[in-house]
Image (tube, grey):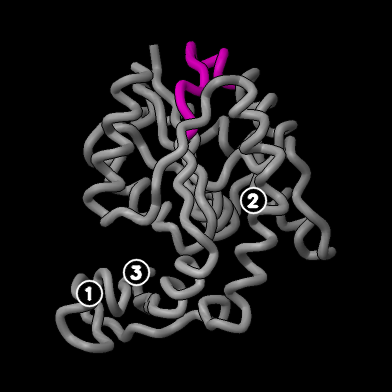
Amino acid sequence: MATYIVLLGPPGVGKGTQASRLSQQTGLAHISSGDLFRENLKNQTELGKLAQTYMSKGNLVPDDVTIAMIKDRLGRADCAAGAILDGFPRTPAQADALETMLRDFNGQVNAVPFISAPQEVLVERLGDRWTCRASGHIFNEKSNPPKELGVCDFDGSELYQRDDDKAETVKRRIEVYMEQTTPLITHYRDHGKLIEINGLQSIEQVTHSLMDALKNRS
């Protein structure tokens, strides 16, 4: 039976890093809904074109379009054993739609790790975050600095600070995330699938906690 993990966590908690590490350790594909949208828009797929008709008018893309993108992605060969979902679902309604969809893949959501940390820690982390221009690799001045200041270790491109990582916008990003995600956290807690992970630990310790928690659910 395929394994599906929904990974939750506010901005700055290291969710993307942990999703990549989990993918490497479990062999499950990492599906970022943001990356998936960009791929469909860039490649001008039928779903990408459909999403663009809503986005060009300033409207939200309907759930059924997003769900169709996710279903198409889960149907690829690298998802045969399951996947780690990052950025989807965002609401209890999407969570219910996901469960219905996963029946077609002989699976269900097995676990929902929620990595959390106090707001003041998240604000500080994001203020120290730098992103490479070429491929989006992320570094942190304190916890994960580049070998050479201002230069990406992987492709040598310039590191820059995103506007939404600047202190004045970070706090609001975190508040909006929690407002939007709290119903989803409650939904998965009520279904006995939520696993709370302490995001104050080191990157390696968080990965270890995640792997331990997932082993206990397998």
The residue tagged 3 is 138
The residue tagged 2 is 48
Q: Position of residue 107 (x, y in %)?
A: 48, 15
Give the residue type that dot 1 points to.
Asp
Q: Tell me the element at label 1.
A: loop
From the viewer's side, name the closer residue of 168 and 153. Answer: 168
Give the residue type that dot 3 points to.
Ile
Residue 31 figure quarter? top left
* Disc 2 crowd, CA 10 A, few/some/many (<14, 14-19, 20+): many
Magenta span? 101-112
From the viewer's side, name the closer residue of 200 and 194. Answer: 200
State the CA–CA distance, disc 1 to disc 2.
Answer: 29 Å
Q: Quadrant of the C terminus?
A: top left
Q: Tell me the element at label 3.
A: strand
Closer to us: mark 1 or mark 2?
A: 1
Upstream in the sequence, badge 1 or badge 3? 3
* Residue at screen point 75% across, 50% down: 61
Residue 28 figure quarter? top left
Contact, mark 1 vs mark 2 (Cβ under 8 Å): no
Give the residue type that dot 2 points to.
Gly
Residue 108 belongs to the span the image colors magenta: yes
Residue 217 belongs to the span the image colors magenta: no
The answer, for residue 37, to whether it is visible in the render is yes
Q: Position of residue 12 (x, y in %)?
A: 46, 63
The residue tagged 1 is 155
